[in-house]
Amino acid sequence: MDPLDSSVSHRNESEGGDGRAPWARFSSWLECVCVVTFDLELGQAIELVYPHDVKLTEKEKTSICYLSFPDSYSGCLGDTQFSFRLRQSVGRRGPWFGEDSYNRDAPITLQRELAHFCGYVYFRQVKDTSVKRGYFQKSLVLVSRLPYSHLFHTLLQIIAPEYFEKLEPCLEAVCNEIDQWPSPVPGLTLNLPVMGVVLQVGRRHIDHIISQTDSYAFFLQNLLPAPTVLPTIHEQDLFKCFQSVLIHLQMLWELMLLGEPVVVMAPSPTVSSETVLALVSSIAPLKYCCDHRPYFTIHDSEFREYTTRTQAPPNVILGVTNPFFVKTFQCWPHIVRLGELKMSGDLPKQVKVKKLAKLKTLDTKPGIYTAYKTFLHKDKILIKRLLKGIQRKRPSEVQSAILRRHLLELTQSFIIPLERYLASLMPLQRSVTPWKTPPQIRPFSQEEFMGTLEHAGPQLTSVLKGDWMGLYRRFFRSPNFDGWYRLRHREMTQKLECLHLEVVCDADLLGWTKDKSEVEIVDLILKLREKLMKARRQQLPVKEGVLEKLEGYIQTIIGSLPEDLQTVLHKH
């Protein structure tokens, strides 16, 4: 099927009166669009929320207001783009809450947030003598549950300059265009028209390079103007984010893997948010199961929760710009202080690892303030390759691809032994029989797993030396292990359920009922119905036709019973 036809077919459904709710397609991409301005009496204030019927709680509105402006220490003049993430109010049920069909098919890094909003900000601050304060200050904010940072920041670059000139009518037109977009579908190439531009998005393999010449001819046949191809919808420029900490990449990867509390102090919200998102993505395809805030302020509703000294710092990574945080976070174990990028000759100057005791003053120098000792040795070959790339003027996107591949392979080397061991806990397929409940998955034994590492450990796929066993033991105590194990265990349980359903469908159920009492037959029918409802409710990935076959068996068995029992069973 032509992937470009998807938007056309969706639009035809809409024009045909498909009965969908107002703003349904818009809501599959965005929660709302907010305009935040500076009011002399109120401070930051929401000027506009679109669509108008979107319900944000007062707490959410306040958070969006404060997170949409750089703090006064950043000194951001002109246009600034950055991201934030905020916790949704308790009890909120958005239009996509509980709708897991997208998340079931999406890779972990692209899954929809269920308890948080992602905010994508385009802030403008320019001199304006007509304003009392002498400056025009306003932010256009896209609020979404999708972590599509690159797509939404590209979208803002198109619509924000126009909005600041033409105001609300422009915004209304853009929102109506977004409401015509096809819903996001993992793996499908989509065309997203907005303001005369067509953004073409789709999942890309890490090393897939698009031939602009070939694609241009292909697109031209389908759409004019030719789409602007986005090679990624969510990835950061890793090299740009990490170029001053390249020699400490191994340490940062381990801190993310272990879910350690980390504060990133940056000179601007842009650097802060990009660095936090890059760090979180560094352990992909493993899901980062801790909280992360790309931009965090003293006005944040979780400020007290995250800065209390009466308990250990939480498992969270915070991006901040206010120097006040130097004092506030002195008790945190890992602080990455970034400054403006400085060059040493033609190479970016690398920050040093420093003792936490030196983190005392507001003018603290850039560095990584921690007492952490890495379990694994640095990959000196990677560092040399990247530094040589800088000298040879290698493009940043190529440097980022090298970094991303290294981090991906490192994470996979760490996870593969865990995946291999977990697969061994699965019951044998021949032990799944139609007349018994599915067998249990064996419990995860840390010591048994550690015993497998000598012959099937990460050394099979990684050249890095070090204390891999120590890293695994520390990982077992982290939220990331808990999240990984829960997800995999649920998938294995569902796989067992699917196998059991298939075995039941292949069994001679009618033959089994011939010498059974009515009570036993009714009990079988109720159990089969329960399995059928559970499979549909959980959207189990069973083979095609299995559920229909089971439904047919149930009806056939009911038909073999006396009429009075048939009537009762059909009613219930």
Image (spheres, rainbow, N blue to C red):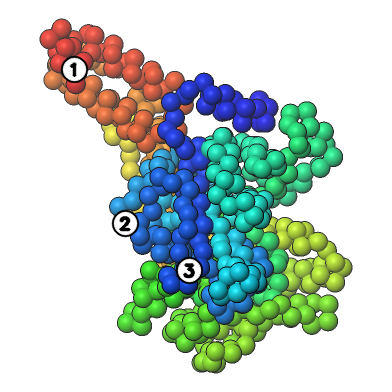
1 or 3: mark nearer the eye: 3
**C-alpha gap between disc 2 and disc 1:** 39 Å
Residue 360 shows which numbered tag? none
Answer with mark 1 or mark 3, whichever residue precedes in sequence: 3
Answer with mark 2 or mark 1, whichever residue precedes in sequence: 2
| Above or below, 367 relative to 146 | below
Pick the quarter of the image with the N terminus: top right
Pick the quarter of the image with the C terminus: top left
2 or 1: mark nearer the eye: 2
Residue located at (57% from left, 80% from top): 73
Q: Which residue is mark 2?
A: 90
Horizontal arrangement in the rendering, residue 205 relative to residue 63 (left or right):
right
Residue located at (81% from left, 70% from top): 390
Question: Which amino acid, by three-letter code, is at mark 2?
Answer: Val
| Quadrant assignment, res 184 | top right
Question: Which amino acid, by three-letter code, is at mark 3?
Answer: Asp
Q: Which residue is mark 1?
A: 571
Q: Which residue is mark 3?
A: 39
Viewer-side residue, 507 vs 71: 71
Secondary structure under the numbered disc 3 in the rendered image: strand
Whether residue 362 is visible to the viewer of this picture, yes or no, is yes
Q: Position of residue 67 (x, y in %)?
A: 49, 66
Answer with mark 3 or mark 2, whichever residue precedes in sequence: 3
